[in-house]
Amino acid sequence: DQQVKQNSPSLSVQEGRISILNCDYTNSMFDYFLWYKKYPAEGPTFLISISSIKDKNEDGRFTVFLNKSAKHLSLHIVPSQPGDSAVYFCAASAMSEGAQKLVFGQGTRLTINP
Amino acid sequence: GAGVSQSPRYKVTKRGQDVALRCDPISGHVSLYWYRQALGQGPEFLTYFNYEAQQDKSGLPNDRFSAERPEGSISTLTIQRTEQRDSAMYRCASSSGTDYEQYFGPGTRLTVT
């Protein structure tokens, strides 16, 4: 049972436009969410996170939105740049339950076209 | 400072052999995690240490898999009697314990022939 799902395996966006990556989860105990970015031959790199007590967190060009009632989060990248081309993973954890493990989605490959 | 390092980066072994994968976390990080990642999937949790104590090993697939972190720093993931289905990328991550972000190493690509 896939508790964290990224239903779009790939996304192509023009440079300068907004990239929106989506993630859905099923476990209502999840209360902390993270986005990771991965380049080829490297490990995933932490990008941005959000606690369930918030519905938005912003860091520069990156904003994560959390809709708890819909069990949905999204990552917005504005404006998109060629260096943003990578695989993006969302991950979730049930921190209030003492669970340290992250549950990852399958990833979305983002391609930014010049 | 230095990030998480893992060795070897690539390991090819014959079915039935034992392998040991090493993880060197970020200096001072108290928590260490092992994940396994299949092609086209996200990392999947295997086990987690807080200092030298193994707090959660619920993700280890079977008793051929074990991990240790005897001095609360470097960790070793051991797979005994390897099988072809063990072929995957094995990733290690560490965190400070005061925030929740985990920082990943480059991984060890294990191929069992």
Image: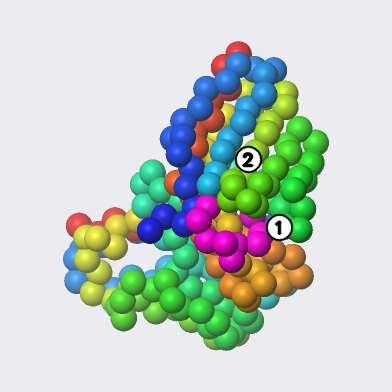
The residue carrying mark 1 is: A52
SS at mark 2?
A: strand
Residue B84's x, y, as percent? 22, 60
Which residue range is magenta in the image? A25-33
- Give the amino acid at mark 1: Ser
Q: Mostly what secondary structure, the magenta segment?
A: loop
SS at mark 1?
A: loop
Point 71% across, 72% down: residue? B97
Residue A74 is marked as 2
Q: Is residue A32 magenta?
A: yes
Verify CB contact (< 8 Å) between mark 1 and mark 2. no
Residue B86 quadrant: bottom left
Point 72% across, 57% down: residue? A51
- Give the amino acid at mark 2: Ser
Point 36% across, 47% down: residue? B39
Which quadrant of the rendered structure holds the N terminus of chain A? bottom left
Label 2 resides on the chain identified as A
Asked whether residue A35 appears in the rendered view, the answer is no
Residue B58's x, y, as percent? 44, 76
Residue B63 quadrant: bottom left
